[in-house]
Image (cartoon, rainbow, N blue to C red):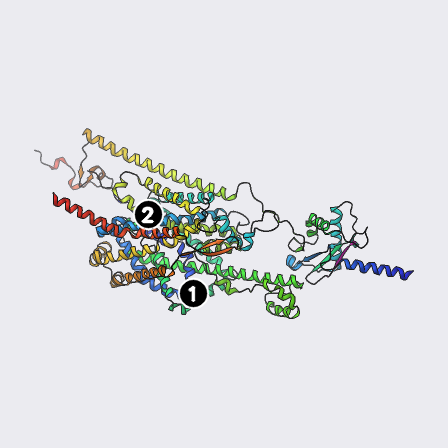
């Protein structure tokens, strides 16, 4: 008699918690939450955020973890057990995870690029490069700032629009290959290796954030940023977009619907207390978002104050040179009075000078809200270049970005690999090293698209459309399936068997009513938003002006967007249909016999 | 006689003074930012500093062209402001009341720029000759870009890690296969009967953790012989 091959398990529950934290705490906590906080009312945004956490985040997280732990299979197998007609849900999760892993690792490639360039003095994004005859700086760099130039020209080498594809940038391709090799190294042995890696990827970002918090709070002008962020603008609470953004952020920040949480939970002991773990993970995720935004806003404040003071100094220099005033006679304090005095005494020359005199405003600097890659790579690197020992802070920061990105990638690849290794068809023929290798290789080759000159535009397409609508639908179907198809009483009993107690009324009400209603309203909102805005637009970099301009997507890009959304959503009805046909055929073949 | 001398002198002087005017031909504006450069160690701009400046310009002209015989008195300064900015012009001693062409002065200053800068403890940015652009020095670039070196190091480490894990995995796999094939061979030969209890091979039960129960220990004398 042969012994049944047992399912690999986490060495201890702590590895599971760390894996979930490492997956959930990702780049979104660092670069999206601070932006939302700034746009939707500062300190006041925390109110809708916490309400949504309790109404939506914790219940849905608990649901996914419980399903994974009970069924002990990846997403495809788990939903098949709940109901054979729901195998499409699992497949949709895998498809969405596949799309995500295709483009997400490009961020790690960019982080590697910046990390490798941090070992120079001065930092390459600190100064503009010289033009060909060495009489001044590069024209494009003059129009914009050196950090933006480094990002758009030297990192991305971005083309003026989506239609101009350009060639593959070999440097970015190398970094992307390295990023995929790192991911492969971590997932090579399955939970054995992943379990050890997540200790590092979960805890290192916190160490760096604490260092940055201390550094950030001691920077000159940090207080301006913090005050700006935390002054609650409570009138934003009446704006529906605030609540929608809070719900969306909680939803996507926890990474629900990708199948990663189900995959991680499937490697648990059946008696693991996933209720406690769900609460812990969701609270830590939200706390990290707030912590990260404190750090981000002190950095914002520093950068805004620095730019404001440079602007004032430039105006002072201009006036001093034009009117030959003594050095030190014009300071930031008497600038306004002196401007009036000069306008009175030398009206003609002053008027000539007027177009060059910029109105410097600290508010305007702080108002430049940025999110996404712009925040992570441009704003932060700009702040870093002005600190002392910038190389150290730069290395720390980009290592942190890498840890966050790789932690999320581990979850994504687990969502793809767990169903593959569960299926006996594939797992018996190939060892898991080969399956992981093939998946990484395919993703790497497809990911080369994002290293082309127009790659950043394709990245934005994937980032905005590959996962958003599909995930909402997937999680909605999941919740309805567990509550109404599998039955909440059966689910209660399963949880009682696993944990030892039944879920209380809070969980049941959220699962059955609150969360599905919230998701349906989010889904309807996004649909109407897409329909109402008509054409979709994107931001393209104009090298001649040195800034972003808005352009319309060409036809084939819209087709790709439609395909992305349809590819995952269609799996759900198709799966149900296929199962129905298969059952029909079986019934017929049985009846004919 | 004396009156005629005085008259010619004053005419010459005024003519020379007219050579140095803002935006005059071959005149250059200079701007110094002493307080920005030196902070608390800044020196005041007075007649002595002006003298030094004239000397440096004369030095530059002489160094540029060996034929030049520029004297300190040939360099004229005018319109000195509080900013510390002024215009200067270099007159030609041989030809009366004319100025040295601007291109020559520019070339001379360019050639000796860092000598002039260091005489005043300033730099290209804080001692500006407004019409004379300075060539910016490019940053030092090593032969292999630094990032490629770091990239290479990290790449080697990661690839070594992957190869190590794969090889370890293959070895483990081989060991498991060898064990199971050995066991199968022994079973086939019938030499070792593999007793199985509830799906668990009995030999795994012969662990050190197992205790022999003394009550049931085979003690032949206890049993009545048949």
Quadrant, the C terminus of chain A: top left
Q: Is residue B78 magenta?
A: yes
Residue A416 percent location from the top left of the image: 32, 47
Residue that label 1 marks: A42
Q: Is residue A292 magenta?
A: no
The residue nearer to you, when weighing A359 against B117, is: A359
How many badges with numbers are in the image? 2
Residue B59 percent location from the top left of the image: 75, 49
Output the chain of dot 1.
A
Q: Is residue A259 visible?
A: no
Residue A138 sits above or below residue B39 on the image: above
Q: Residues within 10 Å of mark 2 (few under 14, many from 20)?
A: many
> Considering the numbered disc 1 on the image, is that residue within a helix, a strand or a loop?
helix
Residue A182 percent location from the top left of the image: 40, 44
User: Which residue is at a point 43% across and 63% down the rendered structure image?
Assistant: A39
Q: Which residues are magenta?
A: B74-79
Residue B97 sits above or below residue B64 on the image: below
Q: Which mark is residue A345?
A: none
Q: Residues within 10 Å of mark 1 (few under 14, many from 20)?
A: many
Residue that label 2 marks: A414
Residue B155 placement: quadrant: top left
């Amino acid at each position: 008699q042969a012994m049944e091959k047992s399912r690999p398990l986490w060495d201890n529950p702590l590895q599971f918690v760390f894996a979930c934290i490492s997956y959930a705490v990702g780049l979104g906590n660092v670069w999206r939450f601070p932006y939302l906080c700034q746009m939707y009312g500062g300190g006041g945004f925390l109110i809708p955020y916490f309400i949504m956490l309790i109404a939506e985040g914790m219940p849905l997280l608990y649901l996914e973890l419980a399903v994974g732990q009970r069924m002990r299979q990846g997403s495809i197998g788990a939903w098949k057990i709940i109901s054979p007609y729901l195998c499409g849900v699992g497949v949709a999760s895998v498809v969405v995870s596949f799309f995500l892993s295709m483009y997400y690792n490009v961020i790690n490639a960019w982080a590697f690029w910046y990390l490798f360039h941090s070992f120079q003095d001065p930092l390459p994004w600190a100064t503009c490069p010289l033009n060909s005859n060495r009489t001044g700086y590069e024209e494009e760099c003059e129009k914009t700032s050196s950090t933006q130039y480094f990002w758009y020209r030297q990192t991305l080498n971005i083309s003026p629009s989506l239609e101009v594809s350009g060639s593959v940038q070999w440097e970015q391709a190398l970094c992307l290959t390295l990023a995929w090799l790192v991911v492969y190294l971590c997932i090579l042995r399955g939970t054995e290796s992943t379990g050890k890696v997540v200790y590092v990827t979960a805890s290192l970002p916190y160490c760096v954030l604490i260092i940055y918090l201390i550094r950030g709070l001691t920077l000159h002008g940090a207080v301006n940023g913090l005050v700006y962020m935390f002054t609650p603008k409570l009138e934003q609470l009446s704006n529906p977009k605030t609540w929608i953004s809070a719900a969306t952020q909680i939803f996507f920040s926890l990474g629900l619907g990708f199948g990663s949480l189900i995959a991680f939970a499937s490697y648990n002991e059946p008696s693991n207390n996933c209720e406690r773990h769900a609460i812990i993970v969701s609270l830590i995720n939200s706390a990290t978002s707030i912590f990260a935004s404190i750090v981000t806003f002190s950095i914002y404040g520093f950068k805004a104050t620095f730019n404001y003071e440079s602007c004032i100094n430039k105006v002072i220099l201009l006036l001093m040179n034009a009117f030959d005033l003594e050095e030190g006679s014009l300071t930031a304090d008497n600038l306004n009075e002196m401007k009036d005095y000069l306008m009175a005494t030398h009206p003609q020359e002053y008027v000539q000078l007027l177009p060059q005199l910029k109105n410097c405003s600290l508010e305007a600097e702080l108002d430049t809200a940025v999110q996404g890659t712009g925040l992570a790579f441009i704003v932060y690197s700009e702040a870093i270049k002005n600190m002392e020992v910038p190389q150290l802070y730069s290395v720390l920061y980009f290592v942190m970005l890498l840890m966050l990105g790789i932690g999320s990638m581990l979850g994504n690849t687990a969502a793809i690999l767990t169903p593959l290794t569960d299926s006996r068809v594939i797992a018996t023929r190939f060892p898991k090293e080969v399956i992981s290798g093939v998946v990484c290789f395919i993703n790497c080759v497809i990911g080369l698209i994002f290293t082309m000159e127009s790659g950043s535009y394709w990245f934005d397409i994937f980032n905005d459309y590959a996962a958003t609508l599909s995930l909402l639908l997937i999680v909605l179907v999941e919740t309805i399936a567990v509550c109404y198809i599998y039955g909440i009483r059966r689910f209660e009993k399963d949880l009682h068997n696993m944990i030892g107690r039944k879920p209380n009324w809070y969980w049941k009400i959220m699962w059955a009513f609150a969360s599905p209603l919230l998701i349906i309203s989010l889904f309807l909102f996004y649909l109407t938003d897409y329909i109402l805005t008509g054409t979709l637009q994107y931001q393209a970099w104009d090298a001649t002006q040195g800034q972003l301009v808005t352009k319309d997507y060409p036809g084939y890009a819209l087709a790709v967007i439609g395909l992305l959304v349809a590819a995952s959503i269609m799996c759900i009805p198709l799966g149900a249909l296929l199962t129905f046909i298969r059952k029909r055929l079986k019934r017929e073949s049985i009846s004919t016999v | 006689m004396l009156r005629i001398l005085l008259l010619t002198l004053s005419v010459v002087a005024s003519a020379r003074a007219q050579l140095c005017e803002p935006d005059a031909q071959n005149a250059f504006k200079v701007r110094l930012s002493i307080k920005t450069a030196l902070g608390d160690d800044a020196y005041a701009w007075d007649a002595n500093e002006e003298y030094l400046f004239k000397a440096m310009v004369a030095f530059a002209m002489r160094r540029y062209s060996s034929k030049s015989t520029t004297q300190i008195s040939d360099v004229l300064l005018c319109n000195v402001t509080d900013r510390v900015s002024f215009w200067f012009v270099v007159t030609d001693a041989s030809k009366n009341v004319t100025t040295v062409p601007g291109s020559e002065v520019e070339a001379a200053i360019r050639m000796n720029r860092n000598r002039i800068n260091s005489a005043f403890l300033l730099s290209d940015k804080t001692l500006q000759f407004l019409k004379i652009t300075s060539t910016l020095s490019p940053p030092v670039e090593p032969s292999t870009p630094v990032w490629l070196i770091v990239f290479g190091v990290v790449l080697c480490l990661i690839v070594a890690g992957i190869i190590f894990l794969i090889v370890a995995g293959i070895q483990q796999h081989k060991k498991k296969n060898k064990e199971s094939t050995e066991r199968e061979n022994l079973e086939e030969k019938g030499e070792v009967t593999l007793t199985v209890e509830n799906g668990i091979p009995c030999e795994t039960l012969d662990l050190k953790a197992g205790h022999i129960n003394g009550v049931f220990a085979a003690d032949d004398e206890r049993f009545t012989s048949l």
